[in-house]
Structure formats: structure tokens, C-alpha cells
Image (spheres, coloured by chain):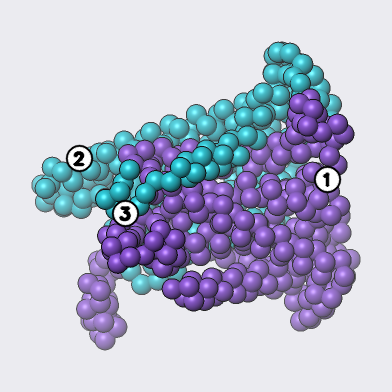
Chain colours: A cyan, B purple
Amino acid sequence: MSGRHGIQKSRWLPAYVTVYLAFLYLPILLLPIFSFNNAASTTFPLAGFTTKWYASLWGNSAMLDAARNSLIVGVTVSILSTGLAICAARAITRYRFRGQQAATGLLMAPLFLPEIIVAVSLLMIVLQIGIELSLATVILGQTVFCLPYALSVLISGFEGFDRSLEEASLDLGETAFGTFRRVTLPVVAPAIISSLLVSFTISLDEFILAFFLSGTEPTLPVYIWGQLRFAAKLPSVLALGSLMIALSVILLTTAEILRRRAERRMQAQGAVHG
Amino acid sequence: MVALPGSVETEVMPKANARRWTSSDEAKGLALISPTLLYALALLFLPVLIVIAYSFWSQDYLTIDRSFTLENYRIALTEPIYRDLLWRSLTISLVVSIITVTFSYPVAWFISFHGGVHKNLWLFLITVPCWTSYLLRVMSWKVILGYQGVLNTGLMSTGLIDKPVTTLLYNSNAVVITLVHSWAAFAILPIYVSLEKIDRSLIEAAHDLGDNKVWSFLRVTLPLSLPGVISAFLIVMIPTVGDYVTPKLVGGKDGVMIATAIQAQFGKGANWPLGAALSVTTMVIVSLMAGCAVLALKFFVRRIR
């Protein structure tokens, strides 16, 4: 195919990638399949179609409380981490300063740390100060955890931004804030929304920090963890899990579409300027 | 490089330039990043310092004795239960990172060299499973590998086996499979990024100079993608050592890892200093192991070159 680079396409490679993708998607596709299965156990052959496991979620007030908690935490975390990441991403892409690498390293550190150590250290400091465990402590912890992801989305969104546009706006008498609102923001908005969605998804799915820091108010993953002890609850957990996976996939697809739109906008902008 | 003259100037004449400095790029950059940085210092850096401090203290029931002691480290390193858990955790994270990187490399290679116009779509397809709930994915593996699980009952209904295989779940193999699945995208992405940076004409040159496919891969592509392989290694190896959910759900008795012991010190066991020492020990040893792995990799690649 791309023989002019001297790199031939082998026959086994696409097959290998297909198998690899199947391996990646197998566990995720199994949950929805069994959530519609008319049996309390997860065995083949399937026992017929039912929606009763989904119906059973409706009347479950503990689950609905956990869903409400997850929503509160997810929205707050995505706004906080995206807000903090906007400052950092802008500083990193727009300015050069001493300690920049160290600062970036610190913000990216949660990616390279075992999550249990982040969780344990946060638990110690929170209890040390004497703060009660609550949704607020989960929010504080998950925000740190989401920062590296929000930051990478935003840095790649800000990187191609043409500074001369802002300079032109300032030269034409617009204030710094006005320039940000009317010139910078429209260009970087898709990256910001994409970062909000990604952070929300991570927060929605995050378990360890929520498990250590949530006290008596469980989020959805913590609620699911509690249900896993009871074999009889498994089908409704599968139904809940399928709904969560569907939501994650929708949010991530939206984020991806926005990210690409931002990329195209940036390229178009580059083309206008030569 | 461009910023160099400015920074030299500020160092030589700090006072005279104090005013100019506040309106410099450096000051603006620092001011802008400071809220984020303070947040991370308060909720990431400071907590880790406290863990380190605690690891040198001791606990008598509910009171913390703040005199310096190495007793927690002695327990963490010599007590058989912790030593075994630590050893197993390190082995599992090493095995998982080697398997993940090896199996992910061809995928990254495929996307980078044959992805064509759909590269972004491929990357998206690879990352989606890794963004969905980690807990749910581990749970799903439990459902797949269980005694009455998908794999066993599926194989039985096709007639390939007549009795369920008992060795699938609740051992360290189940932990390894689940972790390899969880970390796939984290390995593919850095390798892909470094493959993208390779100048394709170098590979062409290797071919023109008579290298066959295998040799041009070993002598050009692999060494140039080494930075990606190294970050893939680190990003998989270090977090997996402290994994809590996977061993708990699919590990059974033989798959327990160090995180369970750490968690116990903050729950029922309630010995914070020991928990802190176990955390620090795990981090230090896994960092050393990761360092050795990186050196070994570099050495290996230099030899075949």
C-alpha cells in the first residue's frame, strides 16, 4: 500500500489489530448483553430478553441517591478541574517561565502515581485537619486526579492558537478581558467543553478516591462496590453498569467531535494567516 | 533559547528590573499558573509529604508518637506477609507492563503507519474502552472468567469442554489479564506519539541501503520509538503496583496485592504509620524497578543496533 515509504502492509497485522480491539471491547459489550438476559446468573446460552432489571432500578432509592451524588460530584469536579486547567494550560502554552517543567510535572503526577497512594495521602490530610468525609472531600480529591487529563486536552487545544489575533484585538483598543471573551474564548471553546466532558466522565467512573473519601454518601461506583457482595443483585448492577457505559460513550464521542472541530478551526485560522 | 537573554538580565540586576519583571512574560506566566499550582501543592504534594512524615512516626492506640523511628520500615520489609505481598505486587506489575507494551506496540505501529486518514478514529476506538468505568470492566472480567461464567458456560455449550475450568478466576493470572486490558490505551498512546515523530525517509533510507523489514525495524524504528516505549512502561508499571480493585475482585487468595494491606492500615487495622511506610516502600521500590527496566531497555536497544 504505502510502498513508497518502503513500509509494506502485512496481512496479519490488520487481523491482529482486529483481535486486539475485540479483546478491548469484549468486557464492555458483555455487560449490556447480560443486562437484558432473563436470568439471575451470567451463563450461556442466554435465557431470553427482558427489561425487568432496568425496571428494578427505578424504584431503588439508594441507587437514585448515589446517582444524584455522582451528578453533584461530577459537575463540580469537571468545572473545578477545567477552570484550574485553563489557567495552567494558558500559562504553559502562552508564556515561558522558570520552573515550568517542574510545575507541569507536578500537575501531571497523578498519572504516574498509584491511585491508592493519592487516596491514602488525601485521607490522611483531610482527617488530620479534622474535615468530615463528605461529597466535598471527594470533589477536592477527584479534581486533583482529573487535572492531568483536562490539562492535556486543553494544552493541545491552546497550542495552535495564533497570538497575533489577540495582539490585533488589543491594538484596536479592546481590553484584556474583552479580548479574552471575544477573541480567545470562541476559538478555544470546543477544547474547554471537551475538557469538561472528559473530566465529568472520569469523575463519574472514578472509584478509589470516592471509596476512601466519601464517608456516608456513596457515589455510583461506591454503591456498585457495595452491591457486588450480593450475587442476587448482579443483574441490576449489570443494568446500571450498562447505563453508565452508554453515558460515558456518549459524552466521550461528543468530546471527540468537539475536539476535532477545534482542530479544524485552528487549521482554518492558520490558513487565513498564510 | 529565546528567553535566555531576559532571564540572565533579571539575575544580574534584580532590583533595577523588579518593576519590569512584574510585567514580564515570566511573571505573567507564574501568576496565571499559580492557582492551579497551589491547588496541586496543597492536595498532592503536601499530602505525600505527610505520608512520608507519618512513615517515620509510630502509633500507640489512638495517639501518634512523633519521635523518629525506622520500625515501620523494618516491619514493611521483613514481616513475611508484607514482604510476600510486596514481592507479588512487583512481579505482577512487571509482568503486566511487559505484556501490555509488547502487545500494544504492533497496534500503535499499525495506526501510525497504516492508519491513513482515519488515524483519529482508530485512536478514539482504542481509548473509549479505557475511559469507561474501571470498576465495571473488572466486574465484567469476573463475570467472564468465573466458574459459572461466560467463558466456561460458553465453551461448555459449544462442547469444547465438559467440565468448567476452575483455574480461570481467583488467581494472579486473572489479575494479569484484567490489568493488561485496563492499561492497553495508556501503552498505545505514548508509543503512537513517538512513532508519529519518526521521519519516514529514515526508514526508506534503511531499505535503500539494503536492510530488510526486520532489520530496519530493529535498527531504525524501534530505537527512535524508545521514548514512547519507556513512557508506556512507566505509565503502566507504577500505577499497577498499587492496584486495589482488580486483586480484590478477581485475585482471590493467591492474587492479593499490597494495596489491600495498605487499605487495611487505614480501615480496621488502623495503623497509619505502618500504612504510610508500606506506601512509601512500595513507591520507592517500584520506582527503582522502573528505573532498572528503563536502563535494561536502553541497553538492549543499543546492543541490537
Q: Secondary structure at mark 3?
A: loop
Q: Which mark is residue A268?
A: 2
Q: Which residue is mark 3?
A: A6
Mark 3: give few (<14), some (14-19) or many (20+) Cα within 10 Å.
some
Badge 3: chain ID: A
Q: Which mark is residue B167?
A: 1
**Hey, which residue is sitting farthest bottom in the picture?**
B12
Mark 2: give few (<14), some (14-19) or many (20+) Cα within 10 Å.
few
Which of A256/B201 is in front?
Answer: B201
Label 3, label 1: how many angstroms apart (C-alpha)? 46 Å
Q: Earlier in the sequence, mark 2 or mark 3?
A: 3
Q: Secondary structure at mark 2?
A: helix
Kindly indicate the quadrant of the structure image that contains residue A239: top right
Q: Are marks 2 and 3 in contact (CB under 8 Å)?
A: no
Can I make out residue A146 in this image? no
Above or below A124: residue B117: above
Q: Is residue B238 left or right of residue A40?
A: left
Query: Where residue A64 sits: x, y (%)?
Result: 69, 25
Identify the residue at horizontal 66%, vertical 63% (top origin): B94
Q: Is residue A71 left or right of residue A190?
A: right
Label 2, label 1: how many angstroms apart (C-alpha)? 57 Å
Query: Where residue A29 sits: x, y (%)?
Result: 62, 29
Q: Nearer the viewer, mark 2 or mark 3?
A: 3
Q: Amino acid at mark 3?
A: Gly
Badge 2: chain ID: A
Q: Amino acid at mark 1?
A: Thr
Identify the residue at horizontal 75%, vertical 51% (top origin): B173
Q: Which mark is residue A215?
A: none
Which of A29/A265 is in front?
Answer: A29
Above or below A159: residue B140: above
